[in-house]
Amino acid sequence: MFDQTLIRQDPLPNEMQILLDKYPRKAWEAHPNFKQATQNWLGAHKMFRALSKAVREDAELFLDKKIDPRNYAAKLSYRGNALVGNLHGHHGWEDYSYFPELSAADPRFDSGLQILENDHVVLDEVLNDFTDAAIRTLDLIKSDEKAAFDEIGKVYEGAEFIEKLLTRHLQDEEELAVPIIIHHKLRG
């Protein structure tokens, strides 16, 4: 269901990191061009990391029978919806607003932005499959807890996939975008 080979393993090419060399991650917060809008964007990424981890950990608790099915259903419904909805909205905004702004400021990095947009396409497919598995699981918890237990493996696998994909993607996205923003004094 979730093809692990779709998760990009390699970081962005070296030529996409030339501004990162000039503006390393550890220096971002102290830089005068590191504005609130960029901090908020990074905050959303932090939330996605935490939510994807929580959704995976909740599924583990259910699989280990360490959480009541109804309690798990409430957590999956809330956290799963927050993860899927916010990720769709966030990367849609990036594709149609944020990335074009970065491209206009510095087209040297368009191939890196295209890699990130390709990650978004994979993420859309995974989020759709995850949503289907989560809905089936929630329906089954109401009607057949044993069958729900069988279905939860797909939710766990999807959450794990999302978490792994986000690990690579968000790091690359941040390390490409923030140096462009700082260098060109964007989003201030």
Image (tube, rainbow, N blue to C red):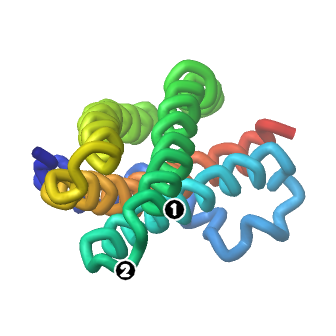
Task: Tell me the quarter of the picture where residue 115 sits.
Answer: top left
Disc with the residue nearer the chain's start (2 vs 1): 1
**Position above or below: 136 against 60:** above
Drawn side of residue 82 relative to residue 39, left or right: left
Report if residue 104 is visible in the image. no
Residue at left offset 53%, top offset 59%: 51
Instruction: Tell me the SS state at disc 2.
Output: loop
Q: Is residue 134 above or below residue 161?
A: above
Label 2 and label 1: CA atoms lie apart by 23 Å
Dot 1, crowdedness within 10 Å: few (<14), some or many (≥20)? Answer: some
Dot 2, how many residues are within 10 Å of its Cα: few (below 14), some (14-19), or many (20+)? few
Left or right of 156, for residue 138: right
Q: Amino acid at mark 2?
A: Lys
Quadrant housing the N terminus: top left
Q: Nearer the viewer, residue 154 or 163?
A: 154
**Residue 43 horizontal/vertical position (percent):** 70, 56
**Mark 2 highlights which residue?**
66
Please name the residue shown 51% across and 57% down the image: 75
Select label 2 or label 1 by which is in front: 2
Q: Most extreme residue toward the front, as rendered?
A: 143
Q: Eyeballing the image, is 30 above or below 12?
A: below
Q: Quadrant of residue 25?
A: bottom right
Front residue of 98/111: it is 98
Report the residue marked by disc 1. 49
Q: Is residue 32 visible?
A: yes
Q: Position of residue 42 (x, y in %)?
A: 66, 55
Q: Residue 33 appears at what percent x and percent y?
A: 84, 52
Q: Secondary structure at mark 1?
A: helix
Residue 70, x across and y down, in percent: 44, 58
